[in-house]
Image (cartoon, rainbow, N blue to C red):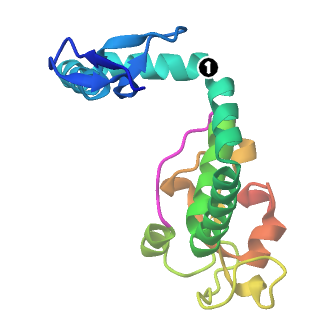
Amino acid sequence: MTEYKTCTYCKQLKPVSDYYLNHGTTTPRSRCKPCVNLCSNISRQKDPDKYRKQNLAHYYKNKDKLNEQRRAKWPELYKSKIEYHREKGKKYRAENPDKINAIARRKRARKKANGWEKYTEAQVLELYGAVCHICCEAIDLTLPRRIGVEGWEKGLQIDHVIPISKGGPDTLANVKPSHGKCNQNKRANLPDDVQ
């Protein structure tokens, strides 16, 4: 036999299954589920920052427990998400090697506290042209840049004139285009030390 209860908010007689249970007990709340949700939404709209802070505080306090519960509830979802993000990351790195290199340069400069600014390789080429600053020969921009790939020696690499390891910043004023082989031969030397 189904039990019924009158909601204190909407004043309708509803089955007990339409009520949330009080925390830690088996007794139903005084308001039905739709009314509880409605009241919660109204109070959230009045002060959304308060609820956002409460939710974040609860999440960080119980982060491990919540993640464990979610993984147990949806294991295949988490596995597929991990695979999805792994594949997405691989694809992004393959399609945007310049951005990945820029991130690595900025990270190295930040670790040394040398200073850095955002710049693109197009800005470097526009400012200095496609001429190697070490050997003063033209750079073939169509050749591969990755070390070990055939033709990389004459391909474009961005060289820090004063190396980051010697205190040089990662800024447009401190970088110039160079051949891959010239840049590798220069290593972490200053321009005057290169023969």
Q: Is residue 131 magenta?
A: no
What is the magenta range?
A: 112-120
Where is residue 193 drawn, in percent x and y?
80, 58
Q: How many marks do you count on the picture?
A: 1
Which residue sits furthest front? Answer: 1
Nearest to the observer: residue 80 or residue 182? 80
Q: Quadrant of the N terminus?
A: top left
Q: Is residue 119 magenta?
A: yes
Nearest to the observer: residue 136 or residue 45? 45
Where is residue 151 drawn, in percent x and y?
77, 90
Where is residue 191 drawn, in percent x and y?
71, 60
Mark 1 highlights which residue? 62
Residue 179's place in the image compared with 42, above or below, is below
- Prevalent SS, magenta region: loop
Which residue sits furthest left? Answer: 11
Determine whether, in the image, residue 32 is placed left or right of residue 115: left
Residue at image position (40%, 13%) is 28
